[in-house]
Amino acid sequence: MKNTNLEKYSVSIFWAVLWCAIVLYMQIKHAFHFPYIEQSQMFLFDGAYLSDKLWQVAGVATIIEEFFTQFFYLSYIGPIFVATALLCVGVLSRSIIKRIAPNANAPILWLIPIALQIATMVDYDYQYSGIISYIMTAAAIRIYLQIEGHTTKVIISSLLALLLYWAAGPAAVMFIASIAVYELLTTPRKAYFTLLPMALVAIAGWIAIYYIHLLGEVRYAFTPDLYYKPMLRPDTEFYFAWVAMPIICAISVLLRHRGNIAPMRKYAEVAVQLLLVAMVVNFSCKDKEYMHPSVTKFKELDYYLRNEQWDDVLRLCKQQGVDNTLHILIQNIALIQTDALGDKAFAYTQLGLEGITMDWSDNNPLIFSILSDLHFALGNTSIAQEVAFKKNSESIAVNHSYNPRMLKRLVQTNIIYGGESGYDIAEKYIAILEKSLRYRKWATEQRAYLDDKTPLPTMMQEQRQNMHNIDLTYRMAENFDLLYDINHCNLSRRTFEHQCVGYLLNMDLESFHQIVSRVYGTATMPKLPQAFAEALLIYSTQNKSIQGKYMIDETTHKRFLEFQNFAAKNYNNRNLASIMRKSYGETYWYYYMFTK
Amino acid sequence: MKRHLIILTLLIVYVVALCGCSHSEENGREADKPLAIFPDYMDVTIPANIAPLNFRIEGHSSEAQARFVTGGNSAIVKSDDSRIIISARKWRNIISQAVDNGGIIEVVVSVKDDDGWMTYAPFKINIAAEPIDSHIAYRLIEPGYESWCEMGIYQRNIESFEQKPIIENSAADYGCVNCHSFCGQNPDKMLFHMRQMHTGTIITDGKKIEKLNTTTPETRSPLVYPSWHPSGKYVAFTNNLTRLINLPNDHNRVEVYDGASDVVVYDVERHEIITSRNLFSTKYFETFPTFSPDGRKLYFCSADSVNMPNEFKSAKYSLCVIDFDAEQRRFGEKVDTLYSAHIGGRSVSFPRVSPDGRYMLYALADYGNFSIWHRDADLKMIDLKTGQEVDMSAANSDAAESYHSWSSNSRWILFNSRRVNGLYTHAYIAYVDSEGNVGKPFLLPQRDPDFYDRFMKSYNIPEFITGEVKLNSYDIAQFAKEDKGIDLKFKMQE
């Protein structure tokens, strides 16, 4: 009795420790993953929305998933959700093992399904309906193991299989596989009855594909692919957790008649199991792109971006450096938003044109939300709206849910467009956002701008005004003189600074000068930003006629001369770039001379 | 016992009150403003075999009722939230009584507000003598922007609310599916294109499915914009270079244009593309071909070729026609012009002749050929017998009206309009009587009147079909994925 209680306490303590460990791991290592997931799903408090979901395969699991993910923007909620879900898997797995083989010395075996899924929890292409379905299935297996009597087993297993298929989808296959393995190993002569739930699930899946067209392909009907983004194929390791449960059932059956074993052997076995779990964790986390530090950093930068924490973006980029053009794009958006692009663009790492105007012709949805933020910051309402639209469409397709971040952008851009059609369409999106918990208040506030009576906030007024300037930049290639028609505003400065920095990154000083010569001295560019002054000094070395035309301070002139002299003196030094980085790394001259 | 009697009496009083209250709502005050309902079904002409016209009363979310009066009979539909949802059975009764009583239904709407019941002035729904084809087919896509995450071509039984997929891209690796077209309105003979994934044109005839690789060395792209010859032996197509540009400061937010385009005809039996110099010219952009119902003429749109995209506003398409001899597989030598863009100053797209050969329906916009993105685009119609233009003002709105098709009996037109919110296209149906008078169009009815509020897709290329497409979408997708396709030959008429 004392031993049993001790075991209970120790198991409870172990669970509590494990839960805390997962929460802390997720919060420390992947805190920004969860808000990242939240922005691409939206739970609606709407009868029609919920009833549509309930008619889908795994609809119940999806509703539960979406209900919880709506709170992922709050600190710790995501880690707590994941830890609790994984712990449920562990508790149910342990209960299954205990039920099949009470005397098996397998105290750690139940950790295997957790170990196999822990990495998946931070895969942004994974849908948490998978872990919900896993829990439902493990619970169904446990219920089944409680049943006695052949007929009851036939009826209950069939009902559970069908119910699971509706509520949890292809996870029902794991249920059938587990009970089939169990029955084959315990009562092989009677195991044939498991063919019935198997057939029922097969029929249900086939009906879902062929008759009611809920699923497009067989893999969605019968494999965990349903819990992964539909346009992608998961890694092989993704399936291991789903295979693990039938294997655990099989091992448990094989261990159920074990007698007493020597304490030393017992400890040795536990040690082997622990080693096995550690290996599984290592195996499932290794070489996962979604766990790469650059991805983690991207999620953090993206979090600061959508929360308009520009100083945090710049601090992170400065302190930890940038790994790819996506990071640089976010860094440059922060510079634009703080009106510092022209002055400080080269004080931060730059890797060419892609860091300021990313190619999106391949319609890669990952970058759409970032691009929308970039173009919105620049006052390019048209592109900001287009990519927001595409990103929201992608969310609808892959998550069967709206993307609230992009819906908000669509509301903003349609209000900026104005006119009857702009307001009508903004109202459509507002009505959807109002059905959510988090975005309701913001959406209702936007209703005030759905006509021409209430003046728009200054930023949106400027956006509307700047549409004309964007049009000019589109037509600039035909005739640079169109730039004399600019409507000057804060956004026009951003628009043309962005254009100019693009040319500078591309080292196209001729086109850069074409713009500056027309915009300099106007309200759009009353004074030269630092990087532009530096660029013009380079340009003036080849085009003497512009010397003296621009107001460039003496310090910059002097420093440029020093730069030239130093470079000339040390021209043959192989380490010239690293030597000059210390003094001139933040200048355009350095970028122009050393960046390839 | 006494207590039971009291309860029984109260129950009887309650039941009588319930029965009697049907009209008491209308005894309330008269509404001091006009009724607004969505969709707007007021004073529309509908076919007898259409699904129930469920609607919501705008500006209210409280208790309401609608009384449908026809002849001496009436039927009441009640609502707790001002959404009038009519059961199929009740709707059939209302319609059959209306058909027997002059084909007019009067609808009296009453709503309850803080001051009690209020009744609006009644509106009418007219029932036409001619039925409508039982099904329509359309593509559901996100509007514009070349975005095709999830799409499909669907068929909808418009006598009910049942929608089934003909093909969904989720079953075919999420490529693009487009340009569905039926031979006449025959659901057994159709085609559509697949792009990006499992590329080709799928063409079906009964249970037979073929996949065509429509790019040839002589053509510049896969074939698009199909239109069947009435014999089913030919399909006219456009062969074009389509592009999309953003217009950052224009009320038409994007422009879809052809950098080049020609018209060809595909011979279904010989797997051969044929064309003539008049349809395959570099001097002109030829597009949107469609055969006349007798199959002897091929209508198409033609514009002087201009430098795209810089001069996209200069591309104005005329409506032209050329003879076609199906027996000899020969085109005529002369091209006639029905609408000249040089004279009229506007641009024609999507010509469609009514199956009885009487009317030519087309879209007219200020420029270009992708009229659905032009707010100025309207439907126009010519009486081919008299050459006179038919008044289409009842069908048009301030928003874009475009892609349209005819019912098999030539009495109904189905078309797209962005009038609800300026962005999402919805399918509208309008009645055309034997004299060519066009009725007020009505929005495709849905089970839930709020459906269009949350629906995030556009209805694209709505087409009438006389019945259900029986091929299963899964079978079609599997075929498209597995079949390598038939390569086509190309022949220019000497």
Image (spheres, grey):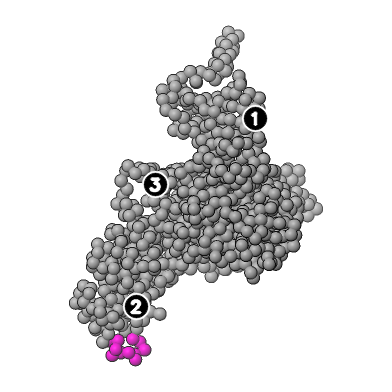
Question: What residue is pinned by disc 2?
Answer: A591
Q: Chain of mark 3?
A: A
Q: Nearer the viewer, residue A500 or B364?
A: B364
Residues at badges 2 and 1 in contact (C-beta under 8 Å)? Answer: no
Which chain letter matches label 2? A
Mark 3 burial class by Cα count in 10 Å: few <14, some 14-19, many 20+:
some
**Do marks 2 and 1 share a subunit?**
no
Residue A444 spot, x, y in % from top left:
39, 43
Q: Earlier in the sequence, mark 3 or mark 2?
A: 3
Mark 2 residue element:
helix
As for residue B316 lying within the magenta part, the answer is: no
Q: Which residue is mark 3?
A: A419
Q: Which residues are magenta?
A: A566-576
Q: Residue furthest left?
A: A554
Q: Name the subunit of mark 1.
A: B
Q: What distance separates the C-alpha of mark 2 from that of mark 1? A: 76 Å
Q: Position of residue A113 (x, y in %)?
A: 59, 59
Asked if marks 1 and 3 fall on the same chain, the answer is: no
Numbered label attached to residue B92: 1
Along the line of sight, which residue is nearer the eye, B105 or A237?
A: B105
